[in-house]
Image: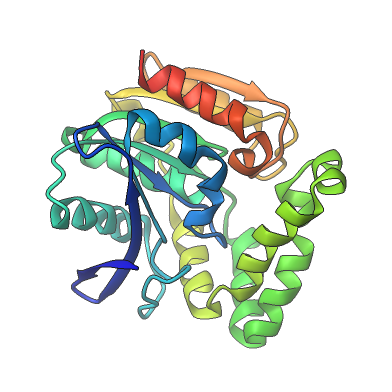
Amino acid sequence: MAFVQLQDGQLHYEIEGPTDAPVLVLSNSLGTDLHMWDAQIASFSKSFRVLRYDTRGHGKSGVSHGPYNIEQLGRDVLGLLDALEIKRAHFCGLSMGGLIGQWLGIHASDRLHKLVLCNTAAKIGGPDTWNPRIEAVEKGGQQAMLELGAGAVGRWFTPEFARDHVDKVKAVTDVLAATSPVGYAACCAAVRDADFRGQVGSIAVDTLVICGSHDAVTTVEDGHYLQNHIHGAQLSDFYAAHLSSVELGDVFAWRVNEFLLS
């Protein structure tokens, strides 16, 4: 296992693909880990040096004192790039990872080639959405995470996918159930407080927005907001719910490759 030491903890990462290829960073959603990209690695690593990591508080990365904020999580990415001596990279993030991508596009565009924002929004919910979840997790601990894992299926996947791919769904929801309650609650606060509606217009790097037509968390309308406010942004709308990378598999990889290699 590979780790980068930050000021207040470690980030776990995996890197694969040709050493001389452009770097593609993959950033996971809330409650998942770097394995949410497993279906795309074989395809992506043909053309890119693929760098995926567990966001702070998730997977094998460190769990520092919360609450977190998106700037902090974005600076974690910059710290990872610096530690690995990577000057610029493509960045693809989903949901919370897409918020991190927006922060990077706004504040660190000199470190980016192209940006892919998946199943995300300039603002995802508010205190009424996030505070009860934070409170439940802080009080209920790992039992609350188990309950979140059971309840996530309907938000994360279309009914057809959940029915036909039980093993894939279970693998992802098991990760959520095992996520640190402290890290999860701290990242919930980061998502709650992030609001880039007044800033996404300053993103100047080439951007692709990917939406799921059945995503009730970050809707197609949220995707169109990003497309309309980021100059020249492209948008692709697929039949999927919130975790489109898991649900779409090769189709997701095809669209991202098409954009990044054009």
What is the quadrant of the C terminus in the image? Answer: top left
Residue, x 67% and y 67% (percent of image)?
Answer: 174
Q: Which colour scheme is used?
A: rainbow
- In this orientation, does residue 121 appear? no
Q: Is residue 141 above or below residue 202?
A: below
Q: Which residue is drawn at 19% across and 57% down?
A: 79
Compared to residue 128, the image places residue 145 above or below, namely: below
How far across and how far down the image is residue 201, in percent? 35, 26
On screen, residue 89 versus residue 239, left or right, reads: left
Residue placed most toward the observer, 115 or 35: 35
Q: Observer-nearest residue: 39 or 136?
A: 39
Which quarter of the figure has residue 47? Answer: top left
Residue at 53% across, 23% down: 254
Marker count (numbered)? 0
| Residue 110 pos. (x, y %) | 16, 34
Of the 4 image quadrants, the one containing the N terminus is bottom left
Residue 133: quarter of image: bottom right
Q: Position of residue 208 (x, y in %)?
A: 45, 24
Question: Which residue corresponds to the image point at 24% horizontal and 34% vertical from the top-left?
Answer: 112
Q: In this view, does 254 lie to the left or right of 16?
A: right
Q: Where is residue 233 in the image (x, y as percent from the top left)?
A: 42, 18
Q: Which of 202 and 39 is in front in this view?
A: 39
Q: Along the horizontal axis of the image, is 146 left or right of 196? A: right
Viewer can see residue 250: yes
Q: With respect to residue 35, does 201 lie above or below? A: above
Is 256 rendered above or below residue 244? above
